[in-house]
Image (spheres, helix red, strand yellow):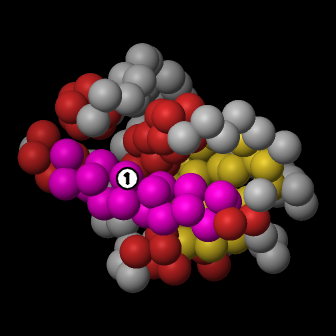
Amino acid sequence: MIKICFVCTGNTCRSIMAERLMKKVAKEDNIPELKISSRGVYATGENINPNAKIALKKLHASSANKKSVKLGKIDKNTLYITMTEQQKQLINSDKVISFKSLIGKDIEDPYGQDESVYFDTAKDILNGVNKLIEKLKMWR
């Protein structure tokens, strides 16, 4: 079992989209041995952002409601994937990478922007998720 936790600021936009997209792709690619979650460095229990839900629906991933969860104790057996290099510095683990290492750029926060920005963000996340899946397939 490989445990993966996506991390962003509030766990209402980017990391929850990454979690849902990763679950979708892993299911489609028949990779059942993954436990996928998401957390926010400063999460406060808010629901998933409505524009994030719209972007997920467009990409045929789950858009069900979920309250944000704050990043707590670091698990040494979990791979943490942050949206930005700055967030990566906040996690004290040797098992942390950022989206920049997957797709060559940070995933910027779409919070407060329109639906099209969320959709573009989700597509960038999906690109990174696909690259991560390819790496996982090589490790199997």
Give how far across and how far down residue 58 sits, in percent. Answer: 21, 31
Report the front residue among 52 and 56: 56
Q: In which quarter of the image is the N terminus?
A: top right
Q: Nearer the viewer, residue 82 or 70?
A: 82
Q: Is mark 1 on a helix, strand or loop?
A: helix
Residue designated by label 1: 126
Crowdedness near tag 1: few (<14), some (14–19) or many (≥20) residues, C-alpha within 10 Å: many
**Residue in the picture at 81% in, 76% down:** 94
Is residue 24 visible from the viewing direction of this image? yes
Image-based side of 114 in relation to 41, left or right: left
Q: Residue at x 49, y 73 (%)?
A: 102
Find the residue positioned furthest to the top: 64
Main secondary structure found in the magenta portion: helix
In the displayed image of the protein, which residue is found farthest to the right? 76
- Quick check: is 123 in the magenta stretch? yes
- Magenta residue span: 119-137
Q: Give residue 118's position: percent from left, percent from top.
A: 21, 47
Q: In the picture shown, does residue 73 fall above or below 65? A: below
The reply to whether residue 91 is visible in this rendering is no
92 with respect to 121 (left or right): right
Name the residue rendered at 31%, 60% in the picture: 124
Q: Residue at left 89%, top 60%?
A: 76
| 4 displayed left or right of 24 | right
Q: Does the magenta stretch include residue 87?
A: no
Where residue 92 sits in the image (x, y, percent)? 78, 72
The quadrant the C terminus occupies is: bottom right
Residue 33 or 66: which is nearer the viewer?
33
Residue 62: % across, % down: 41, 24
Q: Which kind of residue does numbered mark 1 sit on?
A: Leu
